[in-house]
Amino acid sequence: MTTVKPSLELLRSLTDEHVLRELMRERRLTRADLAARSGLSKPTVGESVRRLTEAGLVVDTGERTPGGRGMGRVGSYYALADTAGTALSISIAPDGVVVERVDAHGDVVGRTRHDISRPARAERVAAALRSAATQVQEGGGGTTRLAVVSAADPVHRGTGRLVRLPDAPFLLGDLDPVAELTPHVAGPVIVDNDVNWAAQAERDLDPAGLRDFAYVFLGEGLGCAVVSDGAVRRGHTGVAGEIAHLLTTGPDGQATRLIDVFADLDLRHAGTTAIDVERVHRLPAAGSAALGHAVSGVLAAIVALADPRLVLIGGSWGAHPVILDAITTAFDRMPRHVEVRPARLTDEPSLTGARAEALDRLRAAVIAQRTT
């Protein structure tokens, strides 16, 4: 069997990737530091630093290590150049548009927020999105290479447009985040539903490697993400997990859609299908039990179809102790049930997931610039 040796260019590309990733993890490193951390020889690292400096991706910071008079050679500190660029992580939600600018170290170097009046009309949301994207990029910081968007509405997986479904509580009208943001970034705009991003954040947070679970979001709106073999299952068009129209048991014991349970219990904001979270928190015992029974019917359907190892409950009222207890009590009576527990991330879980994706894609783009 003939062994094929890697080409010199491939070896150089791999070395440069090692060096770039080490500099992404740290603020500054000497060539000796890079050699020690990567396991590569000092001459190999030195050549890589030279190539990356010439490519404009790495710079000599001008800082030096102590040296001379028996203390060894003076070392130069290197860092990523501003040309490594940044990425945008964005949340479009009922409480407003948040746009962050993230660098390749994973630091949020800019953040702005624009409130949205209700009802949220597409043209107002689009204006807030454009304004926030412009504002967060003021003051330099290199090229904005890409944007990752979390949207509190179903998202078409092929186009990135927000999908208008019956009884959707948030956006009135059609919104195309890709078209709105493309003038503000040099590369792609990736858009997905907020519940999918929250599920990915939970997956990445779990030290045991959570790979098969359902994430059920219970807030002003309703949603679900199914993670199987570590990947979010989005369905043909991207609207998998829209649980509002699943049939369950209503307060009167009759079959009804989940979204209608909140009308039956007088838990909606006036003139909309959006759920009044404060009213949910004030539910009496009988109301909590009825709501828990209705949600447990939805969990039973999810388990029957998706076979998750466990169900995580997130959202502004889903993890409320009284409600969660009502859900688990009813769900435990089902013929098929799995562990149910509250989601760990409660502070901007969807934006956390989008930010992590933006960072991964930014780093990959920086490395690809050198290796192409």
Image: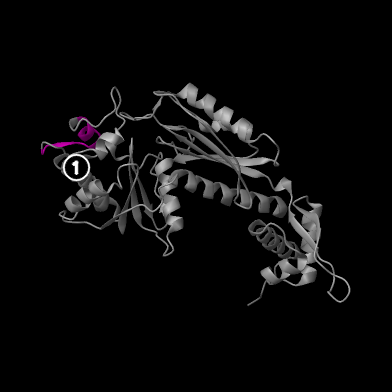
* Residue 297 image position (x, y, % from top left): 20, 46
Q: Position of residue 62 (x, y in %)?
A: 82, 55
Q: Which residues are magenta?
A: 253-263
Which residue does the numbered mark 1 point to in the structure image?
288
Q: Is residue 334 above or below residue 354?
A: below
**Front in this rendered view, residue 132 or 255:** 132
As for residue 310 lying within the magenta part, the answer is no
- The amino acid beneath tag 1 is Ser
Q: Seen from this angle, which residue lies furthest right?
A: 69
> Does residue 123 appear to the left or right of 32 in the view shown?
left
Q: How is the image coloured?
A: one colour
Query: Does the magenta segment cover residue 262?
Result: yes
Asked whether the viewer can see residue 27, the reply is yes
The local crowd at label 1, few if under 14, some if 14 to 19, many if 20 or more residues have their Cα within 10 Å, is many
Q: Residue at x 24, y 32 (%)?
A: 267
User: Which residue is depicted at the point 70% across and 68% down?
Assistant: 6
Q: Which quarter of the rendered picture does the N terminus lie within?
A: bottom right
**Relative horizontal placement of residue 307, taking residue 203 as reference (left or right):** left
For the image, the number of numbered tags is: 1
Asked if residue 301 can be seen in this view, the reply is: no
Q: Secondary structure at mark 1?
A: helix
Give the image location of residue 208, x and y in percent.
41, 65
Up-down: is 108 above or below 122? Answer: below
In the current view of this chain or complex, which residue is farthest to the left? 253
The image quarter containing residue 44 is bottom right
- Could you say which quadrant of the image residue 265 lies in? top left
Name the residue: 66% across, 61% down: 22
Residue visible at 74% across and 62% down in the picture: 9
- Image x and y of residue 276, in percent: 29, 32
